[in-house]
Structures are given as structure tokens and as C-alpha cells.
Amino acid sequence: MKKELSKTPREGKSLASRHLQAAEDLKKHAPDEEELYELADLFKAFSDSSRIKILWALSTADFCVCHLAAALGMTQSAVSHQLRLLKQGRLVKSRREGQSIVYSLADEHVKKVFGLGLEHVREK
């Protein structure tokens, strides 16, 4: 949720003092350093095209490693490696179904971030 910064009235204040006040307001509402590092890590997880292919596939359905590998033209080893990174980044989760491990997106936030990114790239 976006935090509202206070708006200072224009009359009686110089441009410099309004900017200084805006900077102070920004400091008060800024995320802490740990949150910023976690956010950077989140975006790092989206920085690899193999991981993006896997996220796209998982946005359509849940899959096991062997089906992801076949569908995406990747080796099972490569898919497993990328899934491990995505799981560490809390972007995917897994569950056991019989002898298979099935992967899915961790939650709706992941689907939304992926969808917004794709929408942005497709803008002309």
C-alpha cells in the first residue's frame, strides 16, 4: 500500500524549504534496508530467461520437473537448478503427489508481478 507523503502549502515557503520538507517526509516513509535488499533479491530472481520460462509455465498450471523440462526444451537438471533458486526466493512452492514433486507459483503476488512485467514489455 502506498504511503501518503504530507503536502506542504506553497505560500510562504521557498522552493528549497519545500524540497527539504519533501526529502524529510520521504525518509520517514522509506522501506528499511532489509526490505530493500529482499526486494532486490526478488527482482534478481526474475533476471534469468530460464526462470522466466518456468514461471510462465507455472502461471498456466502446476508441473513436475520432467514435464517442465519436456515442455520448455530444458534438461531436468537445469529445471531442477532453476526451481531450487525460485523456491529459495519464495516464488514457487512444491508438494508431493505420489512419487512426484509438483511445483506451482507460491501465491497470487508472483502471478501478478509476472503478469505486470509481461504487460509492460508488450507495451508499444
Image: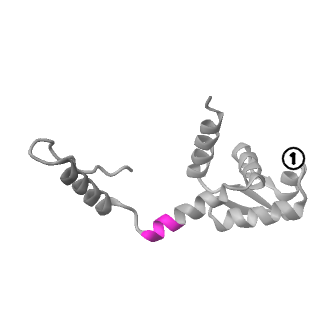
Residue at 72% x, 62% y is 95
Residue at 73% x, 49% y is 58
In which quadrant will I find the C terminus? top right
- Asked if the magenta segment contains residue 3, the reply would be no
Q: Residues within 10 Å of mark 1 (few under 14, many from 20)?
A: few
Q: Which residue is mark 1?
A: 71
Residue at 74% x, 55% y is 51
Residue 77 drawn at (x, y percent): 88, 65
Instruction: Give the residues in magenta.
Output: 33-37
Q: Overall secondary structure of the magenta stretch?
A: helix
Residue 43 drawn at (x, y percent): 60, 57
Residue 41 drawn at (x, y percent): 59, 64
Residue 71 drawn at (x, y percent): 87, 47
Q: Quadrant of residue 46?
A: bottom right
User: Is 62 left or right of 122, judged from the image as shown?
Assistant: right
Residue 96 visible from this viewpoint: no
Q: How many marks?
A: 1
